[in-house]
Image: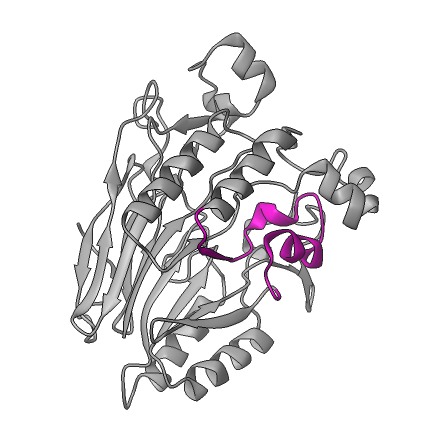
Amino acid sequence: MNVHFAVITDLHVDIMHDGVARMQAFCEAAVAEHVDFLLHLGDMQYPEADFLRQYAPESLEKRKGRAWFVCDRDDEKLAVKRLAAQTGLKLYGVLGNHDMDSCDKATACRYWGMPGPRYSFVEGGVRFIALDTNFVREGAKMLDFDHCNYRGRRAEDIGFLTRPQLDWLEQEILRSQEPCVLLSHAALGDDLLCAHDRAALWDMLERVNSDRRRVILALNGHNHVDGMSVRRGVPFISVNSASNIWIGHQYDTVRYSETICRTYPHIKGCAPYRDALFALFAIDDSGISMQGRSTGFVGPSPQELGFPKEASFFEPAPLVRSRSLPLRALAGEGPVAE
């Protein structure tokens, strides 16, 4: 078992004016560290209009008035994908909640070259299992995220793994000859902005890890914060956004030029990070190593603007912590003070 990989999440090119530069910093670091592959944890960018025109023309009309952050900077979106391709490294990913704001899951998977919303792959003697947390509850039904159909729903009805996927996951873990790393967009170890049926996953981990360590790590994006929780001995790490923390338009702050704010109208509703954030991981028989980065906010911090602490499971901060973790089961249950 020996694998090195680079992780980025929540780039949000449709919000940020410098998404391409952030992606370039990520790709350059990945190449310099000789990683084996790239991984994104969702919410990188909406598909460009030309892609939708070719593969899902009905989505161009459907997304009007529905999608949150439409900003048709197709040149920038093409550049982001080109930068990843130029590394010569395989790019894996998971679906983020905003990835279906302007299309359905099949189109989003096609856009990112994913075999489906859930799948697994093996690199360096480790099995990585990509999960789909993008389901909305409507009565007794679980519906796929589709053209921002979760918008306006109650928070408790948004974000699930679902029983069929949990059953699939348990079989995927049990049949694996390799130790497993779980990948998701929404948090599976936290209690905010999370998959609401996560407790069923924790119970499963207790079963599958009872005789040997089958699941050694779980990674998620979505929350735009850095933090770690332990559930049933497994570390669950929230990887911070590459770009910002979203705090909402009630905290609108002008941090860039009038032209930038006009072109990217939602940039005022976030607290951007000065530099790109991402993580470099190494997993071998000695343990798990996570190399992070630290920067600052552009302009006032969320705390300085009065953003409530309870609105985020972990303290908003412009960093990804470096961590060194053993392969054995970790003690404790819940968020880890770091």
Residue 143 placed where, x, y %? Answer: 69, 62
Visual colour scheme: one colour
Task: State the image coordinates of residue 175 (x, y, percent, origin top left).
Answer: 45, 88
Question: In the figure, residue 294 lies in which quadrant?
Answer: top left
Q: Residue drawn 25% across and 46% down?
A: 292
Image side of residue 107 versus residue 264, left or right: right
112 or 32, nearer to the observer: 32
Is residue 104 part of the magenta span, yes or no? yes
The answer to whether residue 243 of the structure is visible from this angle is: no
- 115 in relation to 23, above or below: below
| Range of magenta residues | 87-116
Task: Residue 224 in the image: state x and y as whole percent.
Answer: 40, 42
Q: Is residue 101 visible?
A: yes
**Residue in the picture at 21% in, 56% down:** 336
Identify the residue at image location x=20%, y=74%.
285
Q: Residue at x 49, y 85 (%)?
A: 171
The answer to whether residue 23 is left or right of residue 31 is right
Quarter of the view holding residue 289: bottom left
- On whether residue 121 falls in the magenta region, the answer is no
238 w.r.t. 326: above or below: above
Where residue 272 sits, quadrant-wise, is top left
| Residue at the far bottom in the pictured view | 211
Query: Quarter holding the N terminus?
Result: bottom left
Name the side, left or right, on which 25 lies relative to 230: right
Q: Where does the image place residue 164, in percent across and percent down from the top left?
A: 60, 77
Could you tell me how many numbered marks the image carries?
A: 0
Q: Nearer the viewer, residue 137 or 222?
A: 222
